[in-house]
Image (tube, grey):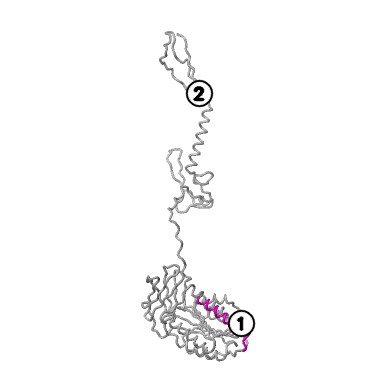
Amino acid sequence: MAARPGAPARRAACRAVIAVVLGAASTLGVARARAADELVLANAHVAGYPRIELSVDAPRGAAALRPADVSVIEDGQPVEALVDRLAGEGLEVMLVIDTSSAVGADALAAAQAATTRLVDRMPVGVRVGLVAFGPDVRLLVAPTDARAAVGASIETLAGGGGGPVADAPVYDAVVAASRAFGAGARARMIVLFDAAGDVGSAATVDGAAVAVAGQHVEVVSLETPATSPLALARLAIEGRGDVRSAADAAGVGAAFDGVADAIVGRYSIAYTSRGHGTVDVRVVTLVGELHSRLELPAAPASGPTTAPSSPPTTAPTVGPTTVAPMVAPAVVVAPVETGAPEVRAIPAARRATAPPNDGGPSGGPPWTTIEALALGGLVLIVALRHLGARRVEALEMPVVDAPRWPPPLPDQVFHHPWPAAFVRDGDRLESEPELTGAR
């Protein structure tokens, strides 16, 4: 099949972009690290911070790790971690194989042999299923423990030929595989082999990414002019997996062997982080250790410490439809006969329909101290003005005998013949005594 002009350059650019995407976006801020070629940090999921989830691949052929064999140290401080082996009881793996015309006969044969080896390496308790696509989507085997049935279906795969691509609905195939898992599956993994990109799917790449959310996705990509590296990277990123590219049939076999190693030897290590910003993480196991640097959210800015403000002294405003919970309000009534107060509870129906009145004007908010003082002062001023404007009568002043200088004549007596009358004349009050003659 003749390559289109400029295809090698475009493929090289796509490989560069996919390397950047997988190295940064899929790990969400993790700098991949390898230590002593013993443990490999496949990816780190930090989107659920402070919960951190590391995917660690153990060396091929290493004994299974127990949780007690794994220690996690963050910035020099040991942290408690949960360790779970991916290829354990309850794992289901769906193989999704491209059989479109974009896959050559040699590459398809290599994929068949490699997937057969992958099935044989799965530990006991792992269930395997098979989906083929091109020109249509076919669910050949649902997840099962019957490895022989899966192997027989792999051998019957046919297609390829290396001609022009008619239909290769990879997105529809991924969606179909994501729906084939059993309800009791503890973990779900999709292993996708693609050579043609997507042609003829009803689903979109966004729909396929949503379908695989929460599942593991490993991709083997055979490089052809029709391959869509960015779309495959999107699926791998959503599934927290990797894209392994193969240039030829030999590369296809090696890529599938890498996927099998990752499934058998992959462990999920989850812990709760106490760090912020850039942190150093060290994972120590019986088969080796690894170091990595994670980029976590920065610590929140600490503002100046201020004394808490005093609570308001006024009661909150109660709306017209608000009914006070808890204790029913009561009304204090003073009977006329005895003057002793009695307490009557307001019926619930009235409380629910009548607007609340807690002392304020027209059922509004209660009087504050300042408002009460202002009202009292206003009443006092009005009363004083009223009293000052009135003429006060009937105020008797008793007759008072007092010494006088010079002394009065013997035939004169100092007394008031009638009650004194107080008359307001500006600011002066006058009382007019009268001297009378001797009687």
Residue at 46 percent across and 47 percent down: it is 313
Q: Is residue 336 visible?
A: yes
Residue 199's tag is: 1
Q: Which residues are magenta?
A: 1-23
- Rounded to the nearest whole Å, what is the CA distance between mark 2 and mark 1? 112 Å
| Residue 292 position within the rendered picture, expressed as x and y whole percent measured from the top left | 43, 75
Q: Amino acid at mark 1?
A: Val
Image side of residue 230 versus residue 84, left or right: right
Q: How many marks?
A: 2
Secondary structure mostly seen in magenta is: helix
Q: Is residue 13 found inside the magenta-colored segment of the image? A: yes
**Compared with residue 205, is residue 412 higher up or lower down, i.e. above or below?**
above
Secondary structure beneath dot 1 equals loop
Image side of residue 41 versus residue 227, left or right: left
Q: Quadrant of the N terminus?
A: bottom right
Q: Crowding near pointer 1: few (<14 within 10 Å), some, many (20+)? A: some
| Residue 319 position within the rendered picture, expressed as x and y whole percent measured from the top left | 53, 51
Of the two numbered discs 2 and 1 on the same chain, state the one appearing first in sequence.
Answer: 1
Closer to us: 191 or 140: 191
**Compared with residue 178, is residue 276 higher up or lower down, i.e. above or below?**
above
**Compared with residue 359, is residue 291 higher up or lower down, i.e. above or below?**
below
Q: Quadrant of the C terminus?
A: top left
| Residue 333 position within the rendered picture, expressed as x and y whole percent measured from the top left | 46, 42
**Compared with residue 348, is residue 124 higher up or lower down, i.e. above or below?**
below
Residue underneath mark 2: 428
Q: Is residue 267 found inside the magenta-colored segment of the image? A: no
Residue at 43 percent across and 38 percent down: it is 339
Q: Is residue 89 visible?
A: no
| Residue 117 position within the rendered picture, expressed as x and y whole percent measured from the top left | 47, 89
Secondary structure beneath dot 2 equals strand
Q: Crowding near pointer 2: few (<14 within 10 Å), some, many (20+)? A: few
